[in-house]
Image (spheres, coloured by chain):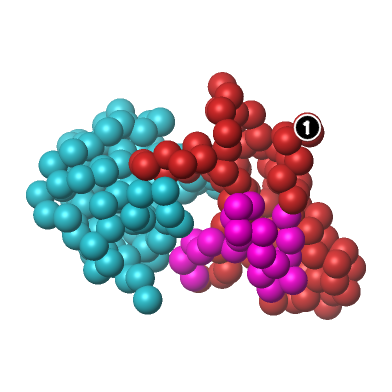
Amino acid sequence: AQRVTQPEKLLSVFKGAPVELKCNYSYSGSPELFWYVQYSRQRLQLLLRHISRESIKGFTADLNKGETSFHLKKPFAQEEDSAMYYCALSGLGGATNKLIFGTGTLLAVQP
Amino acid sequence: DVKVTQSSRYLVKRTGEKVFLECVQDMDHENMFWYRQDPGLGLRLIYFSYDVKMKEKGDIPEGYSVSREKKERFSLILESASTNQTSMYLCASSTPGETQYFGPGTRLLVL
């Protein structure tokens, strides 16, 4: 079964602390993994995708095929990072690029 | 900049009413998607379309239908609204295999 699991509904950290948002997946083929973010009162937007291997707003994520994970990390959290984060996957190279989303993790960065 | 717009930010309807949610994109994208977003459930795909007049069911199509008469417009139809369809509805569009861009969402309340 194709599935994305985000085990934490809420992650609360203090400003300056490291952040790791967990994402595990189950997929039979070659997946493409994404992190989407939704700030308060804003639309859902792409944060990063694994094939681009970019660091966006200080966030990175490495695809670990052995552990079927794609955890999102940032060494020093900022208050403006507070948002809902969704991990998602689609089939690599698929034309219809349907996304399967996890249930989301709300990141709250305390001052 | 890609622009995906949705006809309403908020809608209040009564049980049994026929409801139309409209989505328009201005980037000539082939693919368009309708999701619903619920707390604790993440985003779930209702329907998607990969060309004009072409559609495929997503994970939760029951109680919904769609229409795509023009490339830029993708409509979600609730044939007979029910209270369990109270939700946030998100539209997205993309070129095949590329990033999905999301609209601002329509929050629907069915009384």
Assign the N terminus of chain B to one quadrant of the image. bottom left
Q: Which chain identifier belongs to the red chain?
A: A
Question: Is A21 situated above or below B1?
Answer: above
Is residue B8 at all visible to an observer of this figure?
Answer: no
Q: Is residue A111 visible?
A: yes
Q: Is residue A94 left or right of residue B49?
A: right
Q: Is residue A54 magenta?
A: yes
User: Residue, x 20% and y 50% (percent of image)?
Assistant: B75
Residue reaching furthest left? B69
In the rendered image, residue A33, in percent from the top left (x then y), is placed at 60, 46
Mark 1 crowd level (few <14, some 14–19, many ≥20, 10 Å Cα)? few
* Quarter occupied by residue A110: bottom right
Dot 1: element: loop
Compared across the picture, whether B72 is left or right of A12 comes to left
Q: Main secondary structure of the magenta part?
A: loop
- What residue is drawn where x is 74% and y is 50%? A62
Place of residue B94 in the rendered image (x, y in percent of width and height, measured from the top left): 36, 55
Residue at the extreme top of the image, as rendered: A1
Residue B89 appears at what percent x and percent y? 37, 51
**Residue at far right of view:** A17
Disc 1 target residue: A66
Left or right? Give the position of B22 relative to B32. Answer: left
Chain B rendered in what hue?
cyan
Residue stretch rendered in magenta on the structure: A42-61
Residue at 53% over, 61% down: A46
* Residue B16 drawn above or below residue B37: above
